[in-house]
Image: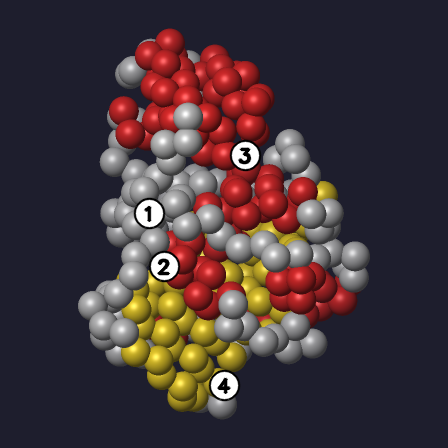
Amino acid sequence: MDIQTLVVTTGQTDLSLLDKMNIQTDAIVGNQCDRDEILRTSHGRKKLLWLSMQERGVGLNRNMVFMRATADICVFADDDMVFYDGYPEVVRELFEKYPEADMIVFDLDEDRPRRKKLTKVKRVGRSNYGRYGAARLALRREPVQMAGISFHLLFGGGAKYGSGEDSIFLHDCLKKGLKVLAVPVAIAKLHDDRPSTWFQGYNEKYYFDKGVLYAQIYGWRAPMIALYNCLRHGKGRYKEWGWKRAYGKMREGIRSVRNGRM
């Protein structure tokens, strides 16, 4: 069972990122920068495919590396992660332990914890997939590629709509019947010391983009999901705008999809 680590990054000028991230497998790196170049080389004893491209968008970047993957297991990664020693063996052992799993969501340690820690192995389904990002995901390559699943090009950092490419990806995987497990095992630590490439505050664009995302995932149920989230977080993230105003902007985003104006 061979493993490749698939990294997405921007603005790299050399290969030092691989040592910084402690990459210990064959790797494919998508580097969105100011040039177009393909480099096939080695990193230590591991094979490296380094793709530099001028196009932008994290969904496109993840697709570019995933479509070139050849290993049995692919580990997705962002460039602000540092992997722990021995992570390939941990990944391999867990896929052997859970042969029914097409995908495994790992825990992620953080300098400033924001995500709820996993405490037990659990099935990821339609009710909880939205809390997991692609950068904590490992998967069996062949079932996902055979199902024809890829990342949406209009969502995520560098794309038209601010976030959600990983939620759409997991939604599509579940819709195709793939089995996803979450395990309370961390294989990397996130060093979140850079500004977000998409989040500029809870503003007009944030709520409009959420409406577009809900329409993409939930279809006719999108207004109900948007209303539920506004009421649920009315005293938190929607407090400054007010939940009614936020809901109105989400409805605008939903209508834009229904009217074919994405």
Residue 62 percent coordinates (x, y) = 45, 60
Q: Determine whether, in the image, residue 97 is placed left or right of residue 137.
A: right
Do the numbered discs 1 and 4 sit on residues whose CB atoms are within 8 Å?
no
Q: Nearer the viewer, mark 3 or mark 2?
A: 3
Residue where numbered disc 3 is placed: 217
Q: Residues within 10 Å of mark 4 (few under 14, many from 20)?
A: few
Residue 56 percent coordinates (x, y) = 30, 57
Mark nearer the N terminus (2 vs 1): 2
Residue where numbered disc 1 is placed: 159
Q: Nearer the viewer, mark 2 or mark 1?
A: 1
Amino acid type, residue under disc 3 in the picture: Ile
Q: Determine whether, in the image, residue 71 is placed left or right of residue 95.
A: left
Amino acid type, residue under disc 1 in the picture: Ala
SS for callout 1: loop
Above or below, 106 relative to 227? below
Total labels: the figure holds 4
Residue where numbered disc 2 is placed: 80
Amino acid type, residue under disc 2 in the picture: Asp
Q: Residues within 10 Å of mark 1 (few under 14, many from 20)?
A: some
* Residue 235 in view here: no
Mark nearer the N terminus (4 vs 2): 4
The residue positioned 33% from the left and 47% from the top of the image is: 159
The residue positioned 32% from the left and 42% from the top of the image is: 160
Mark nearer the N terminus (1 vs 3): 1
Near-viewer residue (156 or 82) = 156
Above or below, 157 relative to 93? above
Mark 1 and mark 4: Cα distance apart in space: 32 Å
Residue where numbered disc 4 is placed: 46
Q: Determine whether, in the image, residue 141 is placed left or right of residue 65.
A: right
